[in-house]
Amino acid sequence: MRYFELFNIPVDYHVDLAKINQQYLELQRVVHPDRFAGKGEREKLLAVQKTAEINDALSILKHPVKRAEYMLSERGVDIRAEQQTLQDPIFLMQQMEMREALEELPQSDDVEAAIEQFEQQIKALDVEFSQQLAQQLSSDNEQDLQLAADNIRKLKFVYKLRDELARIEDNLFD
Amino acid sequence: MAYSEKVIDHVENPRNVGSLDKNDPSVATGMVGAPACGDVMKLQIKVSDQGIIEDAKFKTYGCGSAIASSSLVTEWVKGKSLEEAATIKNTDISAELELPPVKIHCSILAEDAIQAAIADYKSKQAK
């Protein structure tokens, strides 16, 4: 997969963010405009294109959902523009309950402990789905790829919960 | 982006917010979610022996358009038969609420919610 190769890291959903950042700095240095100051237009243009590609790769490799969607699309299942709804009653009921709990969180007796506990719950879901994803994304089996697509969709709800929690924290402590 | 007056009205005065008793055999639940924005929608219907929707309630965590779409759908389905309710299309919802193209998925969510509730009712009855 091109972006993983560009950054010289193994094709694996679990990535080493420190390594990505380090490779990014190295790649940026090589294509920096200063190095092309005295060069021809063609070289300059190529350097600009390479810079854009490096930046695209960085934003996708660093972001867990974008990275998963990229890996899945490279395996032939592209869900990046889908408008489809998710219909998994058990998962959605759990999401609904968590959103309700989040709504009531500011009224807790011990708000900080409640936030801490909620963060742990989100983290547990994140870890669960991410571990399944890593396995499914390394498979060539069509069924595994469809399961991966479903896990990515679910992960988006988990990140939404995290965003909502952050928003509530901002409102409480600002 | 500005919401239409109809959306604002539904957001400020949502119709039929709440829950019905899910253990009641005449109550069915449709749960749907939109991965793109993380919206979650629950739509419940209470159906008479004659197959008429007597009551409808919703709970939605999402943007104004998603709340308005589900609020509107609960108003529309009340008094309708299951067959009539099943014909509600997202385009009817988005036209009524004057939703902009980027919010069409909210109306799709509401259409899917009513379809899911009807399917849940049928599977409950089959048991």
Image (cartoon, rainbow, N blue to C red):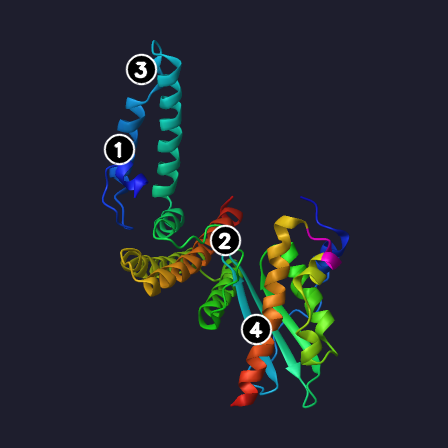
Would you place residue B1 above or below residue A123 in this image? above
**Which chain does the numbered disc 2 sit on?**
A
Q: Which residue is mark 2?
A: A164
Q: Chain of mark 1?
A: A
- Label 3 crowd bin: few (<14), some (14–19), many (20+), radius 10 Å: few
Residue A141 in the image, given as x and y percentages of width and height: 30, 62
Q: Give the Cα distance between marks 1 and 3.
A: 18 Å
Q: CA distance from mark 3 to mark 2?
A: 44 Å
Which of pointers 1 and 2 lies earlier in the amino acid sequence? 1
Q: Between disc 1 and disc 3, whose residue precedes?
A: 1
CB of mark 3 within 8 Å of CB of mark 2?
A: no
**What amino acid is found at the position of numbered circle 2 in the picture?**
Glu
Give the spatial CA distance, label 2 vs label 4: 26 Å
Disc 4, SS: helix
Question: As drawn, is A69 to the left or to the right of A9?
Answer: right
Give me the residue at 57% from left, 76% from top: B29
Q: Which residue is mark 4?
A: B116
Residue of label 1: A23
Mark 1 surroundings: few (<14), some (14-19) or many (≥20) residues within 10 A: some
The residue under label 3 is which amino acid type?
A: Arg
**Tag 4: Cα neighbours inside 10 Å, few (<14), some, or many (≥20)?**
many
Work out how far the residue at label 4 is from the one at label 1, CA to CA, in angstroms: 48 Å
Chain that bears disc 3: A
Q: Amino acid at mark 4?
A: Ala
In the rendered image, which residue does mark 3 sit on?
Answer: A35
